[in-house]
Amino acid sequence: MKKEKPQKKQEVNQLEEQLRRALADYDNLKKQTQKEKQEFSKFANQILIENIVGIWEGLHIITKQFRQLLENHGFEEISVSVGDPFDPHLMEAIISEGKGEQITAIITEGYRLHGKVVKPTKVKVGKLDA
């Protein structure tokens, strides 16, 4: 009978160790599954994005070719920057803030055909803070 107690205690210890290992394995599996789920969610749209990027690159090439074709026929963008003085021959002030005559924002680009303005640059004018 005395031999049974140490043997039972040893069995209990073994079962407790098996339970600890099983719980640790379960916890590791749970963490791994969560990590894989996050990784899947992160890249779930990868094929869609790859297709969109291909289309975007194609549009960029077409836009560049189209712009070059227009420029070859005398069409050009009016070059204007924030801080430039307002020029009513090239620009249309659609927003005016204060008494300044500097361009504070470019709303839409303007264009010329053989030097003639066909669409003025739409700008916001005012006084830039120094």
Image: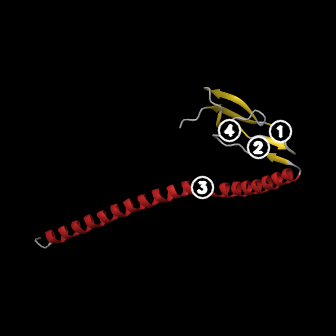
Residue that badge 2 annotates: 78
Residue occupied by mark 1: 117
Q: Amino acid at mark 3?
A: Ala
* Image-quadrant location for residue 89: top right
Q: Residues within 10 Å of mark 2 (few under 14, many from 20)?
A: some
Give the Cα separation between the discs numbered 2 and 4.
Answer: 11 Å
**Residue 33, position as x, y percentages in the image:** 46, 59
Q: Position of residue 63 (x, y in %)?
A: 79, 52
Mark 3 → mark 2, Cα distance in angstroms? 43 Å
**10 Å crowding of disc 4: few (<14), some (14-19), many (20+):** some
Q: Which mark is residue 44?
A: 3
Q: Rounded to the nearest whole Å, what is the CA distance between mark 1 and mark 2?
A: 8 Å
Q: Say if 84 sits above or below 49 in the image.
A: above
The amino acid pointed to by label 2 is: Ile
- Could you tell me the amino acid type at mark 1? Val
Distance from Cα at disc 1 to Cα at disc 4: 16 Å
Q: Residue at x 87, y 49 (%)?
A: 74
Among all residues in the image, which is located at the extreme bottom? 3
116 with respect to 48 (left or right): right
Q: Nearer the viewer, mark 3 or mark 4?
A: 4
Outermost residue toward the left in this view: 2
Q: Quadrant of residue 23?
A: bottom left
Q: On the image, numbered disc 4 is attached to which residue?
A: 106
